[in-house]
Amino acid sequence: MLALLGLLLSVAPASCSPLASEGAGGGVVRAFTYPRYTEMQAKIKEWKRRYPTLVHETTLGKTAEGRTIPLLRLGDDAAPDPKKPGVLLVAGIHPRESQPPVCLLWLADELLSGYGKDARITRLMRERQIYLVPVLNVDGKIYDETAQPPKMGQDWRKNRRKTVPGGSSVGVDLNRNFPVRWGGFREKDALWNDRTSRPGANIYEGPASLSEPESKALADFFAAHAGDVRLFVDLHSPLRKILFPNYLHGADADRYATLAAGIRTRQKDRPYASTEIKRDGEPPAGSRPGNTGLSYTYAYYVHGIYGFNIEIGLNDPADETATSGDLAPRHYPPLAGVRAEYEANLREPLLYLIDAAGDLPTSTQKRSPLSPVEMIGTFLPGSTVSLKPSLLEPTGFAVLTSESRLAVIESELRSVPLQTGFTVRIAHDAKPGAEIHFTLTVWDRDRNRSALQFFMNVGRANDTILPKDENKK
């Protein structure tokens, strides 16, 4: 098994074709398929044996079923060096998207085998902190592998949490579970023809933001490394897109434009479409367009880490018209095609991003004066209110989030100075007197960050609330 996986992970393109092996009698023993999770673990173990000074394995956290989520740091430092720019690459949030994990393993194998031999790779390994999560959704990955031939996988997207006690629904879409823009498609999502609030849906967002141990583990990593990890890439498939936050302010709009162009110019085979930047703007009050609860928007807007979602897809124009429905064939494409896509359109962009992280600024924690929050409306079950802080920053933007299921923040991003408040919808089943906690993250044009926390009680009428200082214990 390890021999086959070693061939699979070889950086030589010819060795990665999904050809069948032949036994001594000439019979077919096994056709190459995607590596199983146990094989990935074996490969990590092999790396640690072969490159003990370059591979440092820890744990990101635990899954819903209690499994550990491996976190690798590649570099020649025995301990993390926060002075070196960090990059986090994650795959496997959606288990059925089989291309991202194997592409991340190919990249890791090249970084490790090229150290001391290739000048560019050696420099990156010495000057960067490179963090890898080969599979975030370990439970889902293992379940996806239970499919019987001829199926390549269970076409499973979510984690394996029992969503309703005593019910049959299983799983939360981890990439709809982050606080920024959580609670989005309470009505029907036309793209998926379903609702994020329905427990059985493929895009079920969970009972509250960060309700899942896998997404919470990633959020905790962002919080712990916001001062040193400058760039985050969440690898998905199969849509051939470069996605990132579209409402961008000040110099960050130019930085994102440069990074997106840098990715596309390094793609040899029909560069991917990328997000359209909306400079110094904000979504309309109460607007909920686009996907919600995403990892990369949360990383950027709350923690200041430049976030990307790169959707890997094979070079087939006819394949790109469908974006929902039955995409099973595109989730498990021939491995030879994935390797060709990696060589043409992913390898160089990822190496570029690791390098470019060194030119990105970090965020700075700032102690701003507490800002009273004016409430317009009555904080009653089922009501919609506007929360408008009195922000003193001259320019920048602010983001309002909550980890409570009782509040959906419909317009969580506002330009500073504020012209309109944050639109908040209260759950119909909220009990009078219940506390709903909020976090207001404020950014100025110099990437200084202030975080203010406050709570409100359901049943409260028009009022002004004074946040608490999160820096005081």
Image: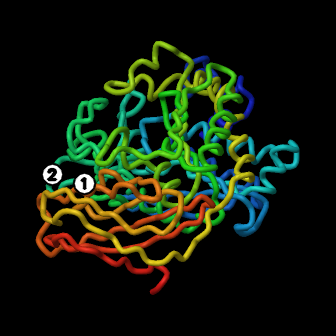
In front: 389, or 288?
389
Number of disc labels? 2
Q: Do the residues labelled 2 and 1 touch (CB within 8 Å)?
A: yes
- The CA distance from mark 2 to mark 1 is 8 Å
Identify the residue at horizontal 34%, vertical 55% (top origin): 420
Locate residue 124 relative to residue 19 in the image: left or right.
right
Where residue 115 appears, as percent x and y from the top left, is 82, 48
The quarter of the picture where the C terminus appears is bottom left
Locate residue 190 relative to residue 414 in the image: left or right.
left
Identify the residue at horizontal 53%, vertical 22% (top origin): 334
Where residue 464 appears, as percent x and y from the top left, is 28, 74
Describe the element under mark 1 as helix, strand or loop. Answer: loop
Chosen colour scheme:
rainbow
Under mark 1, the amino acid is Lys
Residue 349 shows in this picture: yes
Above or below, comparing residue 394 to residue 272 in the picture? below
Above or below, comparing residue 310 to residue 296 in the picture? above
What residue does disc 2 label?
Answer: 167
Where residue 164 appears, as percent x and y from the top left, is 18, 54
Q: Residue 70 carries which label?
A: none
Locate residue 324 relative to residue 451 in the image: left or right.
left
What residue does disc 1 label?
Answer: 162
Above or below, comparing residue 384 to residue 331 in the picture? below
In front: 405, or 213?
405
Under mark 2, the amino acid is Gly
Of mark 2 and mark 1, the one earlier in the sequence is 1
Describe the element under mark 2 as helix, strand or loop. Answer: loop
Residue 35 shows in this picture: no
Mark 2 residue crowding within 10 angstroms, few (<14) / some (14–19) / many (20+): few
Identify the residue at horizontal 35%, vertical 44% (top origin): 284
Identify the residue at horizontal 78%, vertical 53% (top origin): 125
Mark 1 residue crowding within 10 angstroms, few (<14) / some (14–19) / many (20+): some
